[in-house]
Amino acid sequence: MKQNEALDIVKQQLTEHRYQHTIGVMNTAVHLAGKYKCDEKKAELAAIFHDYAKFRPKDEMKQIIIEQKMSEELLIFNSELWHAPVGAYLVETEVGIKDVEILDAIRYHTSGRVNMNKLERIIYLADYIEPGRHFPGVDEVRELANHDLNGALIQSIRNTMMFLLKKNQPIFPQTFFTYNSLVSETKEEFSE
């Protein structure tokens, strides 16, 4: 699918603000894919469609989670998490993208998962650091992303968890598992 075609499809699903965010994620993801030797076309498509379901009604997303037998744990936590797995499902069924790597990058862009592949890491990080994002700690993660993909990813997850802890918000268990997996992986790299 060509970039313009994909952007036209996504634009119909998003607000103008979210569409501009998507452009930022796309450009950041393609840049990171080039830097870290990942498939740039897959990074572009995953980034374009990562928020495809962001503005679907909560009732619709809840119904899809139940009907498609996605983790019901999602329903216990913040509904902001729902658009990622539901988005992967809708991108496959409505848009027709069948590439598992692209769908998984969309599916895990909010929570991460244990043993994320490179494309998943890039989409997660691009969503966090795209130029339209302005919050404490984002510049540090942007700087890390220039030379240390895993370090930037770990810092972004740490920042997210600290933000939630300060607000007395629950943290989705998969986010903890992702963080632990990445930290363990990094320690193994340094101990070899």
Image: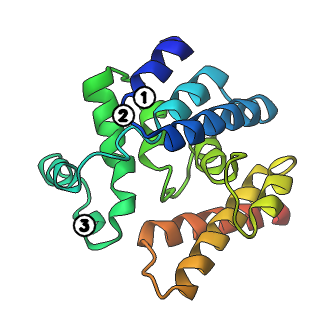
Q: Amino acid at mark 3?
A: Leu
Q: Secondary structure at mark 1?
A: helix
At horizontal 59% and vertical 26% (from top left) the residue drawn is: 44
* 45 on left or right of 147: left
Decide which of tag 2 and tag 3 comes sooner along the chain: 2
* 166 on left or right of 159: left
Q: Nearer the viewer, residue 103 or 133?
A: 133
Look at the image and tell me whether residue 192 can be seen: no
Reading the image, the residue beneath label 1 is 10
User: For residue 104, what is the image quadrant?
Assistant: top left
Q: Quadrant of the C terminus?
A: bottom right
Q: Nearer the viewer, residue 67 or 190?
A: 67
At horizontal 68% and vertical 68% (from top left) the residue drawn is: 183
Q: Amino acid at mark 1?
A: Val
* 170 on left or right of 115: left
Reading the image, the residue beneath label 3 is 75
Reading the image, the residue beneath label 2 is 13
Please state the horizontal and vertical placement of residue 29, each as a whole percent of the image. Answer: 67, 36
Decide which of tag 1 and tag 3 comes sooner along the chain: 1
Tag 2: Cα neighbours inside 10 Å, few (<14), some, or many (≥20)?
some
Q: Secondary structure at mark 2?
A: loop
Please state the horizontal and vertical placement of residue 102, each as a whole percent of the image. Answer: 48, 31
Please state the horizontal and vertical placement of residue 167, each as a whole percent of the image. Answer: 52, 85
In this rendering, the label closer to the viewer, 1 or 3: 1
Q: Do the residues under discs 2 and 3 have CB atoms within 8 angstroms?
A: no
Q: Do the residues under discs 1 and 2 have CB atoms within 8 angstroms?
A: yes
State how far apart marks 1 and 3 are (Cα): 25 Å
Q: Do the residues under discs 1 and 3 have CB atoms within 8 angstroms?
A: no
